[in-house]
Amino acid sequence: MKKIVIEGGTKLRGSIDISGSKNSSLPILAATLLIDEKITLTNVPIVKDILTMINLLETLGKKIKIKKNKLEISSTNKKNYFAKYELVKTMRAGILVIGPLLAKLNQAKVSLPGGCAIGARPVDIHLDILSKVGYENKVLKGYVVSKKKFSKNKVSYLFKKISVGATETAILISCLSNKKVILRNIAIEPEVIDLINFLNQAGANIRFLRKRSLVVNGVKNLKGIEYKIMPDRIEAGTYIVASAITKSPLILNNISIDHLKNIIVVFKKIGLKFKFISNSSLKILPNKLKSIKIKTVPYPGFPTDMQAQLMSLLIFAEGSSEIREDIFENRFLHVLELQRMGAVIEIKNNKAKITGTSLLSGAQVMATDLRASVCLVLAGLVAKGKTTINRIYHLERGYENLVIKLKKCGAKIRIINA
C-alpha cells in the first residue's frame, strides 16, 4: 500500500500551476451523456475520480480518448442505462449520470454512491426532484431504479436545502425535454456555473431569474463543442495554506481570482497578504497568523472543502480559533490525526476549538477522506521530524500531481510502497 513520507521544516519556493477543477469536470463529464456529437474538454485534471467517471461513461456508451489534460468524447451505438456498483462505489459524483440517462433513455439503474466518509450525504433531494419532473424512483438492493412515469409541461421546484449535487441533477434532467423547469434555492458554486456555461454553449436554454433561481427551457438536442474546465479553486486554496503554514512566498498560476474571493477574504482576516499579478495569477505573502471564528456555508461563503486545510493553518495562529461545520456532519475525522501530531483541538458537536501552538511533531497518521488527507500533508510540511501518511488513495482521487508540485517547490516529500 502506498504512503506519503514528509520530512518537515523545509521552506518552499517558486510557483505552482493549478489544475482544472475535479468538481467541475465530473458533472460536465456526466452531461456529455446528453450529447451525441463529439465533445472536447480541456484543462481536465487526470485524477482517480476522473478516471473512474471515464470508465463509467464508457460502459454507458461513450468512447473517450485521453491526451494529457484533454478528453475527446464521442458516442457509440451502445446504449446502457446500468451504472454498476463497482464503478460508483468510490465516487460520490457517480449519481450525476442518473439525470442524463433518464433524459436520453427514460430509465436508469444507478448504484448508490460512495466517496468520502464525511457523513450520510443522502440522495433524497436528487430523487425528490426526479419525481417532481415525472420519474418513478425506487431504491432496491443498493441501486436507484428510475423510469419515466408522467410528463408535465411546467415544473417549479424549491430546494428545501441548498445542494450542489442535487442542483446539478435538476439541471441535467431538465435540459432535453419539452418542459419549462423553474428551480429555486439552488446552489451557485462556481462549479455549478461552469456546468451551466458548458450546457448553454452546447445549445441548452438555461438562464438565471435571480441569484438563487433559474429557469431551464428544454430543447430537443445539444451539439458538440470544445470547452475548457475552470481552475480548481479548492486546490488553489490548499496551496495558499501550504505557503502560509511554511511561511514561504509562493506564486499560483492558472487560477480564477473571482472564484477565490470568498477564500482570500478569510485568509486576509487571519493575516495573510496577497499580491495580485493578473486575473489568473497571485503571490501569497505569509504573515503572523491571527485567530478567527468561522463557519462553513454554501457559496459565496467559506467552503466546507477548505475546512480541514484551514484547521491545519489555525494550529499556528495566536490564541484560540473556532470552526463550525454547517454543511456535513462527521467532517472532523482529521482532528484525531492532527492531535497525534501535537495539535490542541477540542470537538463539541459541529464545532472545533483550535488552540494555537508553535510546534507539531511528525507521526504516523491515517487519511480518512480527500480534504482530511491533504490537511495532514500540510501539517507534515511544517512538523518536526518525519510524518508518514497512510491510505493516500483519498489524495489520488482529487489532487493532480500533489507530491510532484510540492517537491518542485522544495518540499521533502515522497511516495513509498510499503
Image (cartoon, helix red, strand yellow):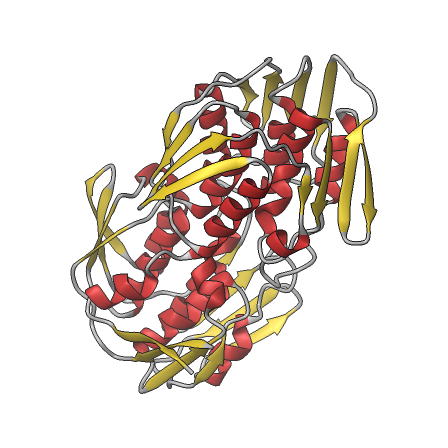
Instruction: Give the vertical position of 121 relative to 387 (above or below).
Output: above
Q: Quick check: can you spot residue 134?
A: yes
Q: Nearer the viewer, residue 392 or 2?
A: 2
Q: Quick check: can you spot residue 163?
A: no
- Picture coordinates of residue 193, whole percent (x, y): 47, 31
Q: Which image quarter is the C terminus in?
A: bottom left
Residue drawn where x is 49% and y is 62% of the image: 370
Q: Nearer the viewer, residue 161 or 164?
A: 164
- Picture coordinates of residue 202, whole percent (x, y): 46, 20
Residue extending furthest front? 77
Residue drawn where x is 27% and y is 70% of the image: 246
Q: Nearer the viewer, residue 214 or 87?
A: 87
Residue drawn where x is 54% and y is 26% of the image: 211
- Picture coordinates of residue 232, whole percent (x, y): 38, 46
Q: Is 253 placed left or right of 239 in the picture? A: left
In which quadrant of the rendered view does residue 280 lie?
top left
In which quadrant of the rendered view does residue 47 lie?
bottom left
Instruction: Give the vertical position of 301 relative to 314 (above or below).
Output: above
Q: How many marks?
A: 0
Q: Is 15 placed left or right of 366 in the picture? A: left
Q: Is 97 placed left or right of 410 in the picture? A: right
- Picture coordinates of residue 380, whole percent (x, y): 36, 76
In which quadrant of the rendered view does residue 197 lie?
top left
